[in-house]
Image (spheres, grey):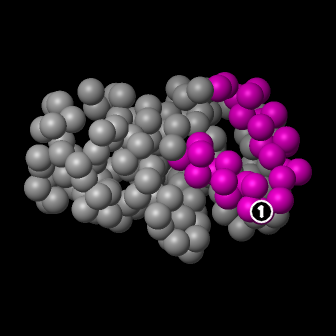
């Protein structure tokens, strides 16, 4: 589908095609549909997210699952999230690795009140753990910006998968 084709979709078709890009948050796509035409689809989607209020952005961050967390264990991750976590080996953790992820997830959530977000397809288990530890030193505003930037990378790769 060309960018001209995407820009020509009616709102319902646009949302149906791209609604799952942002984890449990089709509202981003609904708003982006009204901002067309786009010269660059990813940039347009991210502009819609940037135009959202801080509470809406935080809701998007909170819509993401914890890495190797309860949703992974219960197998209630979205198909995209399950594949992404598996690509980084998070579905094959040793008991010690699982315990470390669980402890870091809990510490991170206690500090920031939202889950740690990283584009797992661009790293591995060791890189994720190192980033979790490093980002614990951030202030909340910096970490919100980091989470939104990582969501942008996740969406970019999901768009590439659709091409």
Prevalent SS, magenta region? helix
**Occupied quadrant, residue 150:** top right
User: From what the image shows, is residue 22 above or below residue 94?
Assistant: below
Residue shown at 25% from the left, 53% from the top: 36
Q: Decide which of 28, 46 is in the foreground and name it.
A: 46
User: From what the image shows, is residue 150 above or below residue 114?
Assistant: above
Relative horizontal placement of residue 106, taking residue 22 as reference (left or right): right
Q: Decide which of 66, 28 is in the foreground and name it.
A: 28
Report whether residue 94 is seen. no
Position of residue 117 measured from the top left corner of the image (x, y, whole percent): 63, 47
Residue shown at 28% from the left, 31% from the top: 162
Residue under label 1: 140
Position of residue 86 measured from the top left corner of the image (x, y, whole percent): 53, 30
Quadrant occupied by the C terminus: top left
Magenta segment includes 3: no
Stretch in magenta: 123-151
User: From what the image shows, is residue 121 above or below residue 47?
Assistant: above
């Amino acid at each position: 589908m060309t960018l001209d084709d995407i820009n020509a979709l009616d709102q319902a078709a646009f949302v149906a095609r791209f609604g799952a890009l942002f984890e449990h948050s089709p509202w981003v796509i609904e708003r982006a549909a009204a901002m067309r035409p786009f010269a660059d689809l990813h940039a347009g989607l991210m502009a819609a997210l940037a135009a959202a209020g801080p509470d809406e952005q935080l809701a998007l961050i909170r819509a993401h699952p914890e890495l190797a967390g309860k949703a992974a264990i219960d197998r209630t991750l979205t198909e995209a999230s399950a594949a992404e976590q598996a690509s980084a080996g998070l579905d094959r953790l040793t008991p010690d690795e699982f315990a470390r992820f669980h402890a870091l997830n809990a510490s991170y959530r206690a500090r920031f009140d939202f889950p740690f977000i990283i584009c797992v397809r661009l790293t591995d288990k060791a890189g994720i753990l190192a980033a979790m530890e490093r980002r614990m030193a951030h202030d909340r505003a910096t970490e919100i910006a980091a989470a939104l930037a990582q969501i942008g990378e996740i969406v970019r790769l999901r768009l590439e998968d659709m091409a």
